[in-house]
Image (cartoon, grey):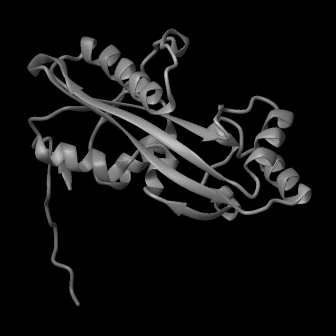
Amino acid sequence: METLKEQKLILASKSPRRRYLLKQAGLSFSVIPSSIDENSVPFSNPENYVKMLAESKAKDISKKYPESWVIGADTIVLVDDTILGKPKTKNEARKMLRRLSGKSHFVFTGYCICRKSKADFFSETVTTEVLFKTLSPEEIEWYIDTGEPFDKAGAYAIQGLGTFLVKRIKGSYTNVVGLPVCEVIEFLIRQQVIGLTVDSPVKR
């Protein structure tokens, strides 16, 4: 799988996790993070909110690079009708992990892919349900001390050490990491932004 030479792809996010996911998919792209004020986007409901944030980020970069395809994305964690952001302190991380312990929560990732010059625009929200194991106080403190909960929505990274917290998921795994790769790739293939290539046959 590769980005076609005549197409230019930009990720409008500074997230190293989204960058990693797209690289794993074999895509060539530039990283140009959006600088929009997220507080300027009004909250409605989780599905619409993350999609509006993704749209705002993609549109922001697309104005500057109208000939390129731009991907914007945003992820939030919802438990008991409460959004969990990124903890700034150990105490905030502790409260979030206690709240998630033994419960199901939902991860919403909104993504937007657009190209301003051709008025191409698509956005949607993908939802994944995640069930946490019941965490002991010792497990919570150990995980916080690793430093991994910080800069992560919901105070955990499913692709990292935080994998041990998760008992079951229903839906897209990569969505929890930060980008629903299957849906993004499907759209890019339909729009002929990327193509499928095989360098060498798989021997069986």
Which image quadrant: the N terminus? bottom left
Q: Position of residue 140 (x, y in %)?
A: 83, 53
Q: In which quarter of the image is residue 57?
A: top left
Left or right of residue 67, residue 139 in this image: right
Which residue is outermost to the bottom? 204
Q: In which quarter of the image is residue 6?
A: top left
Question: In the image shown, does 118 or 23 lie closer to the viewer?
Answer: 118
Left or right of residue 165, residue 192 in this image: left
Question: In the image shown, does 45 or 195 lie closer to the viewer?
Answer: 45
Residue at 47% across, 57% down: 173
Which residue is outermost to the right? 138
Question: In the image shown, does 20 or 159 lie closer to the viewer?
Answer: 159
121 to 132, vertically: above or below = above
**Residue 10 visible in image:** no
Residue at 31% across, 30% down: 112
Q: Position of residue 76 (x, y in %)?
A: 55, 35
